[in-house]
Amino acid sequence: MAEQKIFGYADQFTVKEGERIRFYVNCDGSDTAEAQLVRLIHGDDNREDGPGYIEEEIAHPANGTWAVKKQFTQLGNFLEVADPDNRLKLDGSLSMMAFIWPSMPQKGARQTIMGRWDTRTNEGFALGINPEGYLQFWVGDGREVDYVTSEMPLLKHVWYAVGVSYDAASGTATLYQEAVLNRYNSLIGPAVPYDYASHVRTTLRFAQHNRADIPFLIAGARDNHVLRGDFVADLYAGKIDRPFLTETVMTRAQMDEVRKGGVPGRQGLVAYWDTAAGYSEAGISHDVAETGPWKLHTRGVNHPIRGMTGWNWNGKNDCFRLAPEEFGGIEFHPDAITDCAWEETRAIEIPQGLKSGAYAIRLRVGPGSGIAEEYIVFIVRPAQPKAKLAFLVPLASYLAYGNETLSFDAQIVQPMTGQPPIISDVEIETYEHREYGLSTYNHFEDGAGVCFSSFKRPLINMRPKFRNSWMGVPWQFPADLSIVAWIEHFGYECDFISDLDVHREGVEALKPYNCVMTGTHPEYVSEKMLDAQEDFVAQGGRLIYMGGNGYYWCVNFDPEENAVMEVRKLDSGMRAWAAKPGEHYLQTTGEKSGLWRNRGRAPQKLLGVGMISEGFETCEPFRRMPDSWHRTVSWITEGIDGELIGNEGLAYGGAAGVEIDRYDLSLGTPPHTKIIASSGGHTDNYVLSTEEILYAYAGMVGTLDYRIRADMIYYTSWNHGAVFSSGSIAFGQALPAKGFDGTASKLLRNVVDAFVKDGPLPGQQWTLEEKQWR
Amino acid sequence: MDDMPIIPHDSDTDVRAYFDAKTRIYLRHVLSDALIEEHRRNPHAQHRSEPLGRLLFYFKNLPIEEQYALRRMPGGSYRITTIPRPGQAPVEVDPTDYPDELSGFHGVFLRKIKDLMEKSDG
Ligand SMILES: [Fe+2]
């Protein structure tokens, strides 16, 4: 019997009572799976130091046996052209031309730039790159393929103008290949003495035969498999800028005109994709403008990256908003995936009265563990807000890390964590097959950073019990369940909402609550999320920032596809990759991505603290600081004996660590902020965050630099609003330790008990004499 | 110029090879039973000696192909494997079951010492 494995995803991340949620499941080795709705309460299966894994099985009509099957996933970026009248089915002479910047020309497999080609039956015509990296034009008659091939291999990361003129009457096919490299647009500069050009002419033995049902594609070609059916193969890696197709035999002089920036003449033009058209101040759509005679609707699949520097980019304008015509590059990656687009397996209704919380459909086949067990996670929101407390689930950050494979791909990870990775079967399995896509911590096979991540695919690390392999402890969603378990343990009424809900609905989503708590590592936030939380606090809301390295990257959820988050990593900050020059702006909003700090919105302004260091491998306790005895805040530490706080935890035995944040007036920490407690004595594996560094020097490490610590802070805002920040990822994982009775847990109880109550906060009776700071 | 290589040799690797060889001469010189025992007592200890600190720096900066992982076994123990690479499953390099992470880390440490001693250069 084949190995049994099961993976799935849902169409939504949050769903309300009474609404439907759809599940998509791919299963090998079984045509049925046992389904069970569960409420997730604790995610860390470490039973030595904490309560272990806890889920609650929920009665639901959908529980029981589900019919499941093998599903196939279309990986890769390409452009689909809607051509119902077969305008692009050119049976006679034709020419094609495009600017290209190949990123893996010597890939060892054929890549299609554009064409109407069937890989299985050898029918049609296409322009592409052969496995050895040479430009090629080929035609097929349904039996054989004939082709013309360039004499000079394409260099990676160099812009070229490429094309073909094909005279059907004589059978003559002429390739056009010229570099359009300038001082800025390519990896190498004009000083490199290389012959880029090639112009080869051949007489082909036969003409193309075009079947009516073959699609015209840009960056891919039609293929077919007996079980899978039609799919797209021969995917291209790199950028394509302004491709077009004519029914004429273009001369070399005409192609030279286009190479110099001329627009192809209308005479004989069949399709022209003006990849730089339609940009706005608010970003770029996935629809690509086709401005030829037929205006064929063209759309990117799996989020090709738009607004990238084009063939004519000259280094002066750094954003597609300033000079759209220089940013016509669309970047394609054969391993991109933002929607598995599987057939629906089952839809279920969320019953009225189901308690708000973190849920999953648990699916088991065969042995029912490891890769034979899947949890498709989602959040249930109440139909109407019910509680005074809300848990704000950081979906954007889950997506950022979704399916990360740092342990396997990133040499930097062991230097950072200081320990070998601790790997599990599910990671090994998904890494081997690579069909569920990558995280924004990954690079594509061609080396480019991944800037889109989606929940319309299985996310193997957004599930309970999963332990991050490079650290050996739970991370993101399973770590956040330690906060969920704490809320459950103390019986707080709590509504769960996601940052995507806040992104869509703004402050209205937060207003019903007195107190909102974040997850352990809400690193990725959009402007709308920040605005909503800032307004919430200023209007009297209380925010508990339960994390470290939070509110760091500027991101967006795609307005055309809410399952997809976009980020660009650049300039500074602890980052997995660096966007190329000129490619620092979000395609989906037009705003500059990178660190919020570099846009005048350091996390300190709202949270009081911001990223200072990360080190993993060990954690420390907090120690009370002088401010904590101040009469306005002494209630926070009430009932805690001694000076240490959080000398326990499921993340390396302490509440301060993993990634930590610091109070810094120079970055906008509110001036009346009180430091309740700070950590220190972190190991030298804790290093200063890169955005802090102007001049680098020896000694920016835990035992030598006093700035490397987590600050636990408190400040008050207008209308009885307030912010409490733990400043440490490990804080949330400290809560379940010692039977939820540790000092971190006690302190948080003081804060939450006060924050959920209406009216003034404790300690505010003293503010009359300190009223310049409320 | 027609002799431009399509995928050029990265001469940077020659420099690294020289640098690493020099480092290995030093590390072999300071390696001792006492140093191994220092690591065994606490793989995470901050106040490690300079020779151990430098040895660990060399180990953690090795290329991925020369690194190891601990694989979580169904029974709760750990075994040492190579790091999976694209299209390459992890290979178990040692059938020893390590009862916990820290002893596994020390097992990886010993394996890397073996590799260091077997390098013929420097
Ligand atoms: Fe992070």
Image (cartoon, coloured by chain):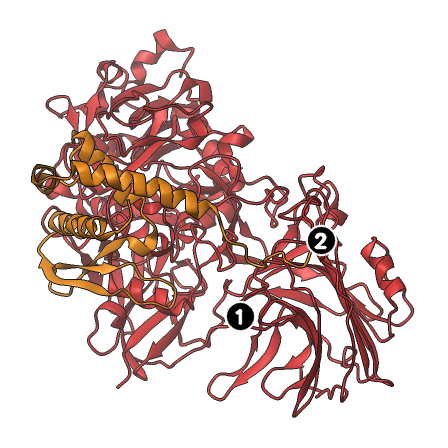
Chain colours: A red, B orange
Looking at the image, can residue A180 be seen? yes
Residue under the image location 19 percent in, 41 percent down? B28
Q: Amino acid at mark 2?
A: Gly
Residue under the image location 62 percent in, 56 percent down? B4
Q: In what quadrant of the picture does the C terminus of chain A appear?
A: top left
The outermost residue toward the top is: A769
The outermost residue toward the bottom is: A143
SS at circle 1: loop
- Is circle 2 on the same chain as circle 1? yes
The mark found on residue A328 in the picture is 2
Count of numbered marks: 2
Q: Which residue is mark 1?
A: A108
Position of residue B55 relative to residue A709, above or below, is below
Mark closer to the chain start, 2 or 1 = 1
Res A492 → quadrant: top left
SS at circle 2: loop
Residue under the image location 68 percent in, 61 percent down? A287
